[in-house]
């Protein structure tokens, strides 16, 4: 039997230019165990990915702020504190950096994400003055979120709802927001493009980056399950 998976999306199932790698549509629909899509993106993104892969919509969004499993939504974290930080950041001249439409934040329930073009030093300075809020750099955005909210904590909730031991999961990811997942899953892999925190936390670093690395991990897991 192949193991259940906890998969990050950006940097892990994507190409270097941020597109979903087409191999995701070959490898994941047929995976014969639960897959949890665990992302920093807002709730609709992983739901849509699972939907169009023909998988159960079992997702962790907003770095653990929102979890969805068996039709149940769990929301943790305090959006007010994160929003207050971003408000103060704007008052001091900071810009979120997504332009007018801002679909990045439109459906966010627990955190606020800023473009990596945003003034990181100012953001961190403003955030440091507010209790129980932290800034996480996923390589794709700066996320202002409650401390204590994490993908790993959400994975425990999801695994419990699925009747699985969190340690049964194999996790794959690429950045500091995956470190908590790596700590909860029984086995963890950082893809070769991963940041230092993810590389350090993972049991193994894949030889290749992005979906090349993830596909190799999946192939080895499938081989082992034979
Ligand atoms: Mg990622």
Image (spheres, rainbow, N blue to C red):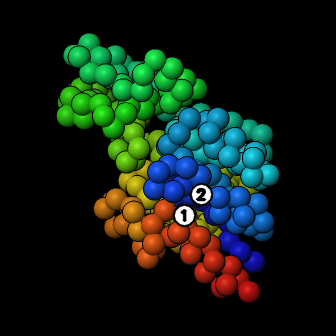
Residue of label 1: 211
Expressed as whole percent of the image width and height from the top left, the position of residue 64 reads 53, 43
Furthest-top residue in this view: 91
Q: Secondary structure at mark 2?
A: loop
Assess disc 2: are there few (<14), some (14-19) or many (≥20) residues with their C-alpha within 10 Å of its C-alpha: some
Tell me how far mark 2 sits from mark 1, CA to CA: 6 Å
Q: Secondary structure at mark 1?
A: helix
Q: Nearer the viewer, residue 100 or 178?
A: 100
* Rendered-image quadrant of the N terminus: bottom right
Circle number at residue 21: 2
Name which of mark 2 and mark 1 comes first in the sequence. Answer: 2
Residue at image x 63%, y 69%? Answer: 168
Count of numbered circles in the view:
2
| Position of residue 104 measured from the top left corner of the image (x, y, whole percent) | 50, 30
3 to 104, vertically: above or below: below
Q: Quadrant of residue 136?
A: top left
Pointer 2 and pointer 1: residues touching (CB < 8 Å)? yes
Task: Estimate the x, y position of residue 214 in percent, counting from the top left.
Answer: 55, 67
**Where 46 falls versus 106 (above or below)?**
below
Where residue 192 sits: x, y (%)?
A: 41, 68
- Is residue 216 toward the left or the right of residue 26 in the image? left
Q: Is residue 88 above or below residue 32?
A: above
The answer to whether residue 147 is visible is: no
Instruction: Choose between 147 and 171: the one closer to the eye.
Output: 171
Q: Quadrant of residue 109?
A: top right
Residue at 51 percent across and 57 percent down: it is 15
Q: Quadrant of the C terminus?
A: bottom right
- Mark 1: give few (<14), some (14-19) or many (20+) Cα within 10 Å: many
């Amino acid at each position: 039997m192949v193991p259940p998976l906890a998969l990050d999306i950006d940097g892990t199932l994507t190409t270097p230019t941020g597109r979903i790698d087409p191999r995701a549509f070959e490898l994941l629909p047929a995976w014969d165990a639960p897959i949890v899509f665990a992302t920093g993106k807002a709730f609709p993104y992983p739901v849509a990915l699972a939907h169009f892969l023909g998988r159960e919509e079992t997702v962790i969004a907003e770095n653990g702020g929102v979890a969805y499993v068996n039709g149940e939504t769990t929301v943790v974290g305090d959006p007010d504190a994160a929003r207050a930080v971003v408000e103060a950041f704007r008052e001091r001249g900071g810009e979120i950096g997504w332009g007018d439409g801002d679909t990045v934040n439109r459906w966010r329930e627990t955190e606020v994400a800023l473009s990596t073009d945003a003034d990181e030093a100012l953001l961190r300075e403003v955030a440091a003055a507010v209790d129980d809020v932290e800034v996480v750099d996923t390589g794709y955005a700066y996320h202002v979120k409650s401390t204590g909210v994490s993908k790993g904590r959400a994975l425990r909730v999801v695994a419990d709802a699925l009747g699985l031991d969190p340690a049964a999961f194999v996790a794959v990811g690429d950045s500091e927001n995956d470190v908590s997942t790596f700590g909860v899953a029984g086995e963890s892999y950082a893809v070769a493009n991963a940041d230092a925190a993810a590389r350090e936390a993972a049991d193994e670093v894949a030889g290749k980056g992005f979906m090349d690395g993830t596909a190799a991990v999946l192939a080895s897991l499938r081989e082992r399950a034979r």
